[in-house]
Amino acid sequence: MKIGFFGLGNMGGPMAANLARAGHEITGYDVAGTTAEGVTSVASAKEAASGQDVVITMLPNGKILRDVYDEIVAYGTKDALFVDCSTVDVESAQYAHAKAKANGLASVDAPVSGGVTGAAAGTLTFMAGGEDDAFQRAAPLFEIMGQKAVHCGTAGAGQSAKICNNMILGISMIGVCEAFSLADKLGLDRQKMFDVVSTSSGFCWSLNNYCPAPGVGPKSPADNDYKPGFAAELMLKDLMLSQAAADATNAATPLGAAATAFYQAFVEHGGRGKDFSAVLPRLSEMKRGDQP
C-alpha cells in the first residue's frame, strides 16, 4: 500500500521503518526533519497526505493532532484510511474522526503500548476505536507494527483504553518502587525481593517485565542509567489525560490522582528526561514525609 506517515520520532520512526521493510511504500513527514529507514521524506504535509491509501499519524498531543487533521484531511483520497496512533485526549480523537468522516475518509484512533523497544521490535499493542470495517482495513498494518490489536469500540475508545491502561501502569510502578525502597531500608536483598514478589501476589508488569532495580530481573532502562524507554514526562502526560477524563465523567480515581501529583513533582524536580521507573532512586533518597 501507499502510506503517508506523519511523525517520525522515537515511536513513529521505527513503526514507519517496519512498514517499509514489509514492502509498503512509505512517504514520511516530520516537522523536525527526522527520517526513518526505507521511508521517503517529503517537505510538506500535502505531499505526505496526497494520493495515499492510508495516512498514519503519531503526534505529541491533542492540539497538534487537531491542527494536522485540519490541514491534511482535505488532501486525502476519497475512502482513504486515516489511522492516528498518538496518545491524546478522547475529545481530540473524536474530533479527528469527525474531520475525517466529513471528508469521506475512514478513520481509526489506535494508540499504542510497548514503548520505543516495542516500536522497534514490531511488538506493540494497539487499542483501536472506530467503525469495524475501518479497523479491519487497518488490522494488517497493526500485525506488521505490533503483536496485538484490540478493537475497543467506537470513535475515541482506543484512547479511553490507553489512558486507563497507563493509569494502572503509573500507579503500579510507584508501588513497586516504594516496595523496593522499603525493602532496602529493611535490609532485604533486592534479588531476593524480586524472587519472592515476582512469583507471588505482587506479580505485575512493572516488576516482572520492567523492574526498576538495576541488575534485577529482565534488562530494563534501570540497567542503562534510567535512560528512557518511556520518559517520566510522558507518563505524566498520560496520567494527566486520565485525570481530565475522570473529571469529565465524575469518576473517582484517588490513586490515579495521587500518582499524577507524584509524577508532576518528580518531573519538576529532576525526573525530566529520565525513565518513569527512575522514581526508585528518588525514593531511595527520601525520608518519610519528604515530597518527590
Image (cartoon, helix red, strand yellow):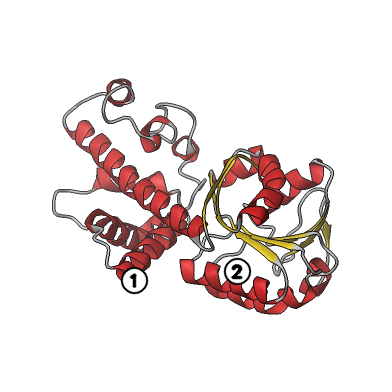
Which of the numbered marks, if any, corresponds to residue 97?
A: 2
Which of the numbered marks, if any, corresponds to residue 248?
A: 1
Mark 2: which amino acid? His
Query: Mark 1 vs mark 2: which is more N-terminal?
Result: 2
Which type of secondary structure does the marked residue at label 2 adopt? helix
Q: Quadrant of residue 150?
A: top right
Residue at image point 71% right, 75% down = 103
Which residue of the protein is positioned furthest toward the left in this rendering? 289
Question: How far is disc 1 from disc 2 in space, using C-alphas?
Answer: 20 Å
In the rendering, at what x and y percent does residue 253 appear?
26, 58
Residue at image point 67% right, 71% down = 100
In the rendering, at what x and y percent does residue 133 appear?
66, 54
Mark 1: which amino acid? Ala
In the rendering, at what x and y percent does residue 144 appear?
70, 41
Left or right relative to 65: residue 106: right
- Looking at the rendered image, the quarter that the C terminus falls into is bottom left
Q: Quadrant of residue 182?
A: top left
